[in-house]
Image (cartoon, grey):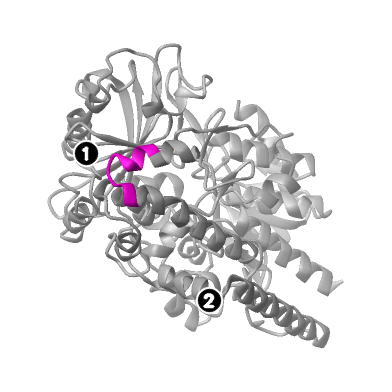
């Protein structure tokens, strides 16, 4: 499925060397592919260089156990920007989204459970089991978040209005001033339309701990904990961490086929997202090469990038280079002496902490949850959405986080379980299933052992399985095999610095004009012709495509200004 679409032969290597490209993209993750597609559609000659044997970065599908196709890292779709889906015609290129309803299931040890989803009547009925007041408040909560997301939408699809760094012509500088004025004027108009009360609530959400936000809305522990998982997923923070309210908003600002806040499975796994984008890029003329690791940037006159050096010694020349790697990894590609003195200091304090482990399981039976009082193999509503294990209260989430703060993998991990094979029949054999476990919190360097120790890894895996057994007795016995990716594994396998799935923390001090760092949010870099286009740039992490699209727009602007 993958190998037949991408070139990694000697013929491709020769093709890379035979001409000077307009643009090279380092890394075939979804943002790199998105940037390549937009650049190629604008008439530039583009080559994508991917280190691994397949493209997609963290959005990949891999058959690690015969017959079972895993979304090995990212596992759900919602954040991919609608403009990217529309403009690149991803549906025509094979993208098929599978909506989930219900979208959330939280089992409780005491025999109760909570289902949530797009069905408003179901939500009211389910929440009423715990609190009638919460059931009445929930639609207002959803409506407020939706209004905040609408306010944010134009910001996500636009480059930050960064001040130009370096030497530019008078016309370019004037155009930049006009563009910034228009940008801030539109922001002010949207803020006035939102109204003072909502603006104050919006700021409160951005800077507050998620616990404060949710406590102000609701009283039922299980509802608050279910919603709070969106505020900590992929981070090392707790529900009590200031600013975690923004992470909560970030994970509800997506949509599926126009339905706001709805997460979906992708038929064929998350690799199908990358495959659809790569198909759009290739159709536009982009050249995509796998097994092509970049070892160094090529620099002329001490300040201009003019290509890359591959690990096999091949030199590939280009007018510009876009890096889909993390900012940290991009710095490592600059040859000695190629960085201004202030750059390493500026970037050295970027936060790449990770507390995330991803597990991919092949099972021969669906989990049977005690609270559902069902004992048959059929798919039920409890299997369709995200299953929240070990998060019945925000105190449990905070306790799991505190273990990691003390250097220990959580004694009772917070687990998000998804079973995409209940809707996607292409990824597992009949009667068997693929299960994703997204687990927190797991320190990069545990104080009580090492992830390089097989027995230590196995011990933690069994801890997770045992916790699931508390809610679904016999689950452990259904496991055929599994793949486990701790933070060091994510770093080694996918070049995610520190194992951070977002290419850097999604804190308020690392967003918008501050992403990746203050003064360098425009995708342009300190070397002429070098650009960042990965999740370490605005609008940030998740399978969004926004960084790639926005970066391509800046590159095209610069090409236009030179001609």
Q: Quadrant of residue 390?
A: top left
If the image is split into quadrants, where does the N terminus sit?
Answer: top right
In-front residue for pair 318/42: 42
Answer with mark 2 or mark 1, whichever residue precedes in sequence.
2
| Start-end of magenta stretch | 125-133
Any mark on residue 136, and which? Answer: none
In-front residue for pair 457/305: 457
Residue bearing mark 2:
339
Residue 430 can be seen in this image: yes
Q: Is residue 156 left or right of residue 560?
A: left
Query: With respect to residue 107, does 260 lie above or below?
Result: below
Q: Residue at x 43, y 64 (%)?
A: 246
Q: Residue furthest bottom?
A: 170
**Residue 446: % across, % down:** 19, 53
Q: Secondary structure at mark 1?
A: helix
Query: With respect to residue 257, does 167 lie above or below?
Result: below
In-front residue for pair 316/480: 480
Q: Residue at x 19, y 49 (%)?
A: 409
Q: Quadrant of residue 379?
A: top left
Residue bearing mark 1:
457
In-front residue for pair 270/181: 181
Specify whether residue 389 is painted magenta: no
Q: Secondary structure at mark 2?
A: loop
**Residue 539: % across, % down:** 56, 62
Q: Is residue 159 left or right of residue 442?
A: right
**Residue 244: % across, % down:** 36, 63
If the image is split into quadrants, where does the C terminus sit?
Answer: bottom right
**Residue 34: % across, % down:** 66, 50
């Amino acid at each position: 499925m993958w190998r037949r679409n991408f070139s990694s032969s000697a013929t491709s290597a020769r093709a890379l060397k035979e001409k000077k490209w307009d643009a090279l993209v380092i890394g075939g993750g979804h943002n790199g592919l998105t940037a390549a597609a937009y650049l190629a559609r604008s008439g530039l000659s583009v080559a994508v260089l991917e280190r691994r044997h397949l493209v997609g970065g963290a959005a990949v599908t891999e058959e690690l156990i015969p017959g079972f196709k895993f979304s090995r890292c990212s596992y759900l779709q919602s954040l991919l920007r609608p403009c990217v889906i529309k403009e690149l015609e991803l549906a025509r290129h094979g993208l098929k989204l599978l909506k989930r309803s219900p979208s959330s299931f939280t089992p409780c040890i005491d025999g109760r459970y909570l289902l949530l989803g797009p069905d408003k009547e179901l939500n009211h009925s389910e929440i009423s089991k715990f609190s009638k007041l919460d059931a009445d408040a929930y639609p207002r909560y959803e409506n407020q978040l939706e209004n905040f997301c609408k306010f944010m939408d134009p910001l996500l699809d636009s480059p930050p209005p960064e001040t130009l760094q370096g030497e530019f012509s008078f016309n370019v500088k004037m155009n930049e001033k006009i563009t910034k004025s228009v940008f801030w004027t539109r922001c002010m108009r949207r803020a006035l339309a939102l109204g003072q009360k909502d603006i104050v609530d919006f700021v409160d959400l951005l800077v507050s701990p998620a616990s404060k936000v949710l406590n102000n809305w609701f009283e039922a522990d299980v509802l608050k904990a279910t919603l709070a998982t969106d505020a900590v997923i992929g981070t090392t923070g707790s529900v009590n961490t200031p600013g975690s309210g923004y992470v909560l908003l970030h994970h509800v600002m997506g949509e599926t086929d126009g339905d706001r806040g709805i997460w979906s499975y992708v038929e064929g796994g998350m690799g199908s997202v990358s495959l659809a984008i790569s198909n759009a890029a290739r159709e536009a003329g982009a050249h995509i090469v796998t097994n092509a690791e970049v070892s160094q940037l090529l620099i002329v006159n001490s300040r201009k990038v003019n290509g890359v050096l591959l690990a096999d010694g091949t030199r590939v020349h280009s007018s510009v280079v876009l890096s889909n790697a993390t900012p940290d990894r991009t710095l490592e590609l600059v040859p000695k002496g190629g960085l201004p003195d202030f750059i390493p200091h500026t970037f050295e304090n970027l936060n790449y902490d990770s507390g995330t482990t991803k597990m991919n399981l092949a099972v021969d039976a669906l989990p049977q949850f005690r609270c559902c009082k069902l004992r048959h193999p059929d798919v039920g509503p409890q299997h369709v959405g995200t299953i929240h294990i070990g998060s019945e209260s925000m105190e449990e989430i905070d306790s799991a986080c505190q273990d990691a703060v003390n250097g220990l993998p959580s004694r009772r991990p917070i687990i998000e379980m998804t079973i995409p094979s209940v809707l996607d029949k292409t990824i597992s054999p009949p009667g068997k299933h693929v299960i994703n476990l997204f687990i927190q919190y797991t320190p990069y360097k545990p104080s009580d052992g090492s992830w390089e120790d097989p027995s230590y890894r196995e011990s933690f895996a069994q801890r997770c399985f045992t916790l699931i057994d508390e809610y679904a007795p016999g689950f452990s016995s259904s496991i055929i095999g599994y793949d486990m990716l701790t933070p060091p594994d994510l770093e080694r396998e996918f070049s995610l610095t520190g194992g951070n799935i977002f290419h850097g923390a999604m804190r308020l001090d690392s967003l918008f004009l501050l992403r990746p760092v203050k003064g360098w949010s425009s995708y342009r870099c300190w070397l002429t012709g070098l650009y960042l286009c990965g999740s370490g740039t605005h609008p940030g992490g998740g399978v969004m495509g926004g960084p790639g699209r926005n970066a391509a727009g800046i590159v095209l602007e610069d090409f236009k200004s030179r001609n």
